[in-house]
Image (spheres, grey):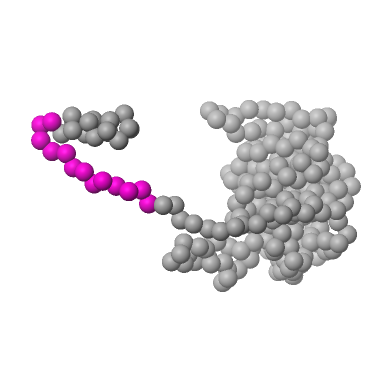
Amino acid sequence: MAVVVAYKYAANPQDATVGADGLVDWSRTKPTVSEYDPVAIQLGRNVADASGTEVVGISVGGAVVATSMAKKSAMSKGFDRGIVIADDATEAWNVTKTASALASLVRSVEGADLVITGDASIDDGTRMTSALIAGFLGWPCFQQVTDVTKTTEGYTMTQMIDGGTRTVDVSGPVVVATTPDAVVPKLPSMKELLAAGKKPVAVVSADELELVEAAVAVAGHAKPEAAIRKNQVFTGVDAAAQLVAALRSDGVL
């Protein structure tokens, strides 16, 4: 078996600005491991340590993903090794194509039977990646997962649901997306930071993988239309009756 964690090296939203048109400007942001991904990495590390296996990090992104700083930042969070696609062309990929690439990277990891993702990425936040990876792999997918334990036949998971939690037993491989607070990520020590630079990170060309093209594009952006308010004020002893009459006249009651 092997635990695979998908992470994203993305722009830090704390560096972003919002223009007068309501659009977010990411041009001056600095990249970092996506905010919720350290939770997924730590959960993967916990499962791997309990099972005596490795944690492999996979990522799809621009050329920056393969830089020394990016690799050290990711590997220091608990990975044993990494496999990445580092190509600026991926910046134009939609979540479907990206997920198909991640699924191909999972297939390249011998014995992989657990894929973990964070709750969402800090830039796009689609919350679709885990389900799409599972779809391409033909594996079941569970989101809002707080805990994963290896069993003889597969995995046991604790999943958040409305009103509480539920425990799910899965036989065979599975993809899970964690909650933002599933575990507390461990801060790397100085020794781990230094060792991270020596961990192997394979850079794979997108041309070597089986990708799915999906023609999806954002056609435009718009602010919600402001509701027209009548600004009526009812006064006097019959103010309540006036309000009820007005609401009925407008079809609210």
Q: Main secondary structure of the magenta part?
A: loop
* Position of residue 174 in the picture relative to residue 111 (left or right): left
In the depicted view, which residue is nearer to us: 198 or 145? 145
Instruction: Indicate the position of residue 65 as horizontal and vertical percent values.
Output: 73, 65
Residue shown at the point (70%, 28%) measured from the top left:
168
Q: Which residues are magenta?
A: 226-238
Q: Is residue 99 visible?
A: yes
Q: Residue at x 66, y 32 (%)?
A: 158
- Confirm whether the magenta stretch covers residue 81: no
For the point 58% across and 63% down, the residue is 12
What quarter of the picture does the N terminus occupy?
Answer: top right
Percent position of residue 249, x then y: 27, 33
> Is the C terminus in the top left, top right, bottom left or bottom right quadrant?
top left
Q: Is residue 19 left or right of residue 28?
A: left
Residue 71 image position (x, y, % from top left): 74, 64
Q: Position of residue 33 (x, y in %)?
A: 65, 59
Instruction: From the viewer's perspective, tell me whether residue 47 is left or right of residue 125.
Output: right
Q: Is residue 220 above or below residue 230?
A: below
